[in-house]
Every structure is written in structure tokens, then in C-alpha cells.
Amino acid sequence: NAGVMQNPRHLVRRRGQEARLRCSPMKGHSHVYWYRQLPEEGLKFMVYLQKENIIDESGMPKERFSAEFPKEGPSILRIQQVVRGDSAAYFCASSPVRQRGTYNEQFFGPGTRLTVL
Amino acid sequence: KQEVTQIPAALSVPEGENLVLNCSFTDSAIYNLQWFRQDPGKGLTSLLLIQSSQREQTSGRLNASLDKSSGRSTLYIAASQPGDSATYLCAVRGGSEKLVFGKGTKLTVNP
């Protein structure tokens, strides 16, 4: 059973370009979470998605950032008009459908390291 | 707003030593707490998950404890090895699906 897959592992963009990060959850998982780790900082929650729905985007910057998890295919985190401050490691996690009364473990991917020149 | 603090930020020990990493959180209304390991340039590996109703979890040389009322968790590593060198992250889940992370403790085990 393959783990959470993220690609690309490393992404270099110039200021003003778009960055598109992909995440394929573990087989059987329908919940996806995106986190960002800035240099020397802890991981910060960005967004939580289920298939075709954004459930919680309270950690997502209001401008330039968007996320989707279509019915088919991977989850995509899109950053438009990137700036140097977007340079960070972006991690995706997935979990299975939550049973009532429990909170499932989140399984993390290897991350995408975005560098903005 | 939940805040998670990990002390110390860095720790260096000789091989074979037993050690304790600390994690504290400000809001005791949590559902679970996870300890992760992160190697340089790599993703996160889940080590232990403690549900709010539990006091501790063990896996091999690792033992994690949880005291919800005081907002504290510890990760105990027995007989440390150079391969244990990594950053250890603590994360709590409150009333939402998101995890709130501490900044981590960077552990170096010297041969």
C-alpha cells in the first residue's frame, strides 16, 4: 500500500510565476490536509479537503492560494504570482473516513520544497 | 487559540543515554496528540498517537505520555542510538480536523 505521494519533490519558480503542487492520498483515504513549513518554523495548517469539497480553509492566505480535491485525480495546491516569502516546504497528509467518535491519524507525504527566486 | 511548545529546541546526547522530550499545549480540550519524527529534507513519520482518554503509548524504545489536565506530553527514548538523530515534532488535534504543531526538538545522538 503506497503512502501519500507528492510531486514534484522540489520546485523552483521565479517571482510572479505559478506553482502547482500535487498530492495523491493513500489508497482508501478521502480526506486531504495541506500544511506549510516555513524555514525554522513549525508546520502550519492551511486547508482541509474532502472529495470535491473544501471543509476548512482557515489557514490559507486569502489571496493567491487555492486548493482543490477533484472527484478524480490528486489534490492540487495552487499558488499564483509567487513571492519569495512563499518559499517553504509544503506537506500533504491524508486520513480515512472518520468513524463517529474517533479522530483518525494523519499520514504525511514527503513534501514539496518550493524555492522562489 | 491552541499553542504548542516544545522544549528543548535542540538536544545533544551520547549514544546509549535515555532522554525525554517535552511538549506542552495551552488548551487542554484535545482529542489526541501525535509525536512525529522528521529527518532533514524528508517528510514526517508518525511515531505514536495518544487518544485523549489514554495516558501513554509505547512502541519499541519509545514511550509517550499524556497529561491532558496539565497540558503536557513527554516522549521518552530509551538507549538512544545515532539513528535516532532527527527532529521530533509534537502535534495536537482539538475540536477540528487540523493538527497544531510545535516547532520541534532537534536531537543529535553522538556515537
Image (cartoon, coloured by chain):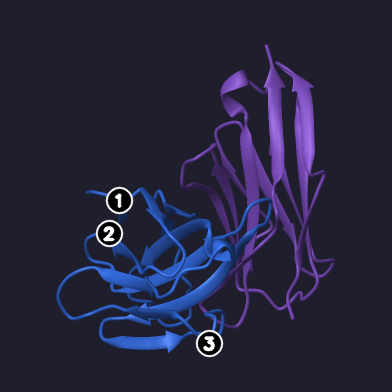
Chain colours: A blue, B purple
Amino acid type of disc 3? Lys
Give whichever of discs 3 and 2 has the lower sequence position.
Answer: 2
Mark 3 and mark 1: span between their CA atoms?
30 Å
Which residue is located at x 43 percent, y 59 percent?
A14
Residue most toward the top?
B111
Within 10 Å of disc 2 (Cα), the crowding (few <14, some 14-19, many 20+) is: many
Circle 2/circle 1 CB separation < 8 Å: yes
Please tell me the numbered disc located at residue A62. Answer: 3
**Residue B100 higher or lower than A39, as above or below:** below
Taking depth in this image into account, of B37 and A61 the one nearest to the observer is A61
Residue most toward the left?
A72
Taking depth in this image into account, of A101 and B79 the one nearest to the observer is B79
Amino acid type of disc 1? Gly
Within 10 Å of disc 1 (Cα), the crowding (few <14, some 14-19, many 20+) is: some
Q: Callout 3: helix, strand or loop? A: loop
Q: Nearer the viewer, mark 3 or mark 1?
A: 3
Mark 2 and mark 1: span between their CA atoms?
5 Å
